[in-house]
Amino acid sequence: MTPDPLLAELTRRAAARAHAAAPACPCGAATLADRPDATVVRHADTVAKAHATDTDPAALAPRLAAAAALPDVLLPPLATAPTLLHGRLVTFWPYGAPVDPDDPDAAPWEEAGALLAALHRTPVPAGLPAMRGPAKAARAVALLHAAGAHPALAPVLAAWRTLPAWARAEAPMPGPGALCHGDLHLGQLVRHPVPDGPWRLIDVDDLGVGDPAWDLARPAAWYACGLLPPDEWTRFLAAYRAAAGPAVPDAGDPWPRLDVPARALTVQSAARAVTKAAAAGRPLDEVEQCLVDACVRMGSLPSQVAADFAK
């Protein structure tokens, strides 16, 4: 098989930067991701990321600057100017230890809530683009359309149609907006420095101005669908509120603020699941079916809040 020139060159660049910072580099190297939307390699303490081919350099620049300016919240890049490599924008980052997928009890829900609250309270930097959450949900639905006929297609699309235009990326998001991550999940947290430094948020591709409730929406959707235990959701929400996060009231029912974003993230997750299952020619697994079942309830009861459609 012919080696991927991007992956080979990205690996070489990561090694060169790692060796420049630490001549006694232990030379541990790995490919962390190799997808159309991101190719990520690690060499010792340096990570090189090739962003998606359609990444706008004018949008990436202020996102990198925001990460560099908020080192107590976001993992700062090693340089704020991307490099162009084989037609892809490349950025360099320090390596951080990710959440252990085999130890769910150690998931840093409190830290995630506190970091989000701090991010949302930060004044929005000038020139920052819109948060890309709704656009990513719309893309997931578009890819589902392109996947062709599937029994789950109709209920997922019906649930999508219950959402307001802003949640489908067809209109501006309401309100003045806050500084948002745009794609919050546990894979977006790392410890830096390794192995037991403080937790930081990573991945600035979707960072921008928007409704801060969107950043709480994936855990909210998982909880509403029965995929996140109630105590973990409670820990996350309580930590966010304790840190004065502005997305929800500091007491009382949070669902009036979380309803639309949680439904949008449910549809996005279901669309991705069905697209992957259709491409592999396999039936939906248990988790994927839970997401589709939630879309069925959403489509039949569009006026109900997320807690009702999922329970």
Image (spheres, rainbow, N blue to C red):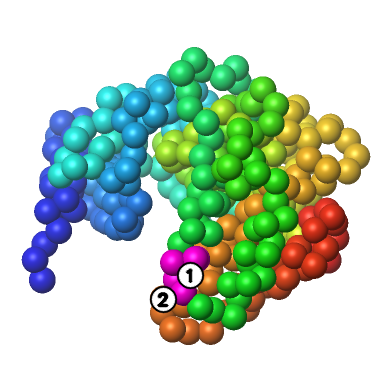
Identify the residue at horizontal 11%, vertical 62% (top origin).
3
Identify the residue at horizontal 91%, vertical 39% (top origin).
252
The image quarter containing residue 204 is: top left
Q: Nearer the viewer, residue 164 or 211?
A: 164
What kind of element bears circle 1?
helix
- State the residue lying farthest toward the left: 2
Q: Position of residue 228 (x, y in %)?
A: 70, 61
Give the residues drawn in magenta, as a range.
144-148
Crowd rating for badge 2 (residues with CA inside 10 Å; few <14, some 14–19, many 20+): few
Identify the residue at horizontal 63%, vertical 67% (top origin).
156
The image quarter containing residue 256 is: top right
Q: Nearer the viewer, residue 146 or 213?
A: 146
Residue behind mark 2:
279
The answer to whether residue 224 is above or below residue 201 is: below
Identify the residue at horizontal 49%, vertical 66% (top origin).
145
Cβ–Cβ below 8 Å for labels 1 and 2? yes
What kind of element bears circle 2?
helix
- As drawn, is 283 to the left or to the right of 164? left
Residue behind mark 1:
275
Q: Position of residue 277 (x, y in %)?
A: 48, 76
Report the quarter where the N terminus lies.
bottom left
Q: CA distance from mark 1 to mark 2?
A: 6 Å
Q: What's the amino acid at mark 2?
A: Ala
